[in-house]
Image (cartoon, rainbow, N blue to C red):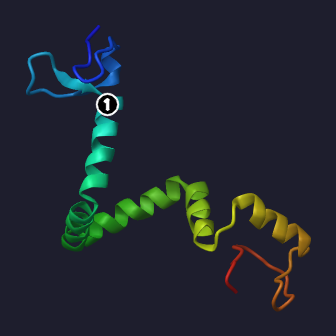
């Protein structure tokens, strides 16, 4: 089993990314260490990374939109959570509000059908 050169732990090959340019065929650092390294880089270079991402997304609009749409389709619960974070409530808070309001809008008292909107 290979040893990560960063954390010095022996790990299975599945804990390393493939890298065909290396003789052994995988990276020197394990996936966990690379994840930490990437997170630290992002924190230190947030503005530059965001600028680069924005530039890429503008140049590759179709590709970016497809990737974003696919992610939303694959992660509906995360989409709901992210939307609710904007309003400072959790999914449980939203469900409690819905039950307390007996499935009706608190503003117009109409029955809510389909997607619930917080900022009606």
Image height check: is 25 above or below 36?
Answer: above
**Residue 62 x, y percent position in the rendering:** 28, 70
Say left or right for 8 vs 108.
Answer: left
Quarter of the rendering containing residue 96: bottom right
The quadrant the N terminus occupies is top left
Quarter of the rendering containing residue 76: bottom right
Image height check: is 81 above or below 110?
Answer: above
Image height check: is 56 above or below 106?
Answer: above
Q: Which residue is mark 1?
A: 33
Q: Residue at x 30, y 16 (%)?
A: 13
Say left or right for 89 vs 63.
Answer: right
**Residue 112 x, y percent position in the rendering:** 80, 79
Q: Residue at x 31, y 31 (%)?
A: 33
Q: Residue at x 77, y 77 (%)?
A: 113
The quadrant the C terminus occupies is bottom right
Closer to us: 28 or 65: 28
Closer to us: 92 or 76: 92
**Residue 16 x, y percent position in the rendering:** 29, 24
Closer to us: 79 or 73: 79
Q: Residue at x 56, y 62 (%)?
A: 79
The secondary element bearing badge 1 is classed as: helix
Say left or right for 78 vs 28.
Answer: right
Say left or right for 117 vs 109.
Answer: left
Q: Residue furthest top?
A: 1
Quarter of the rendering containing residue 100: bottom right
Badge 1 local density, few (<14 within 10 Å), some, or many (20+)? some
Closer to us: 24 or 90: 90
Q: Residue furthest bottom?
A: 108
**Residue 53 x, y percent position in the rendering:** 25, 64
């Amino acid at each position: 089993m290979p040893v990560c050169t960063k954390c010095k732990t022996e790990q299975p090959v599945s804990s390393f990314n493939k890298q065909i340019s290396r003789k052994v065929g995988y990276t020197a650092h394990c996936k966990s260490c690379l994840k930490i390294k990437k997170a630290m880089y992002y924190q230190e270079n947030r503005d530059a990374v965001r600028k680069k991402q924005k530039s890429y997304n503008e140049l590759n609009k179709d590709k970016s939109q497809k990737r974003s749409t696919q992610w939303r389709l694959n992660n509906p619960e995360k989409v709901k959570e992210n939307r609710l974070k904007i309003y400072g409530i959790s999914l449980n808070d939203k469900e409690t509000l819905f039950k307390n309001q007996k499935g009706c809008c608190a503003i117009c008292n109409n029955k809510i059908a389909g997607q619930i909107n917080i900022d009606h």
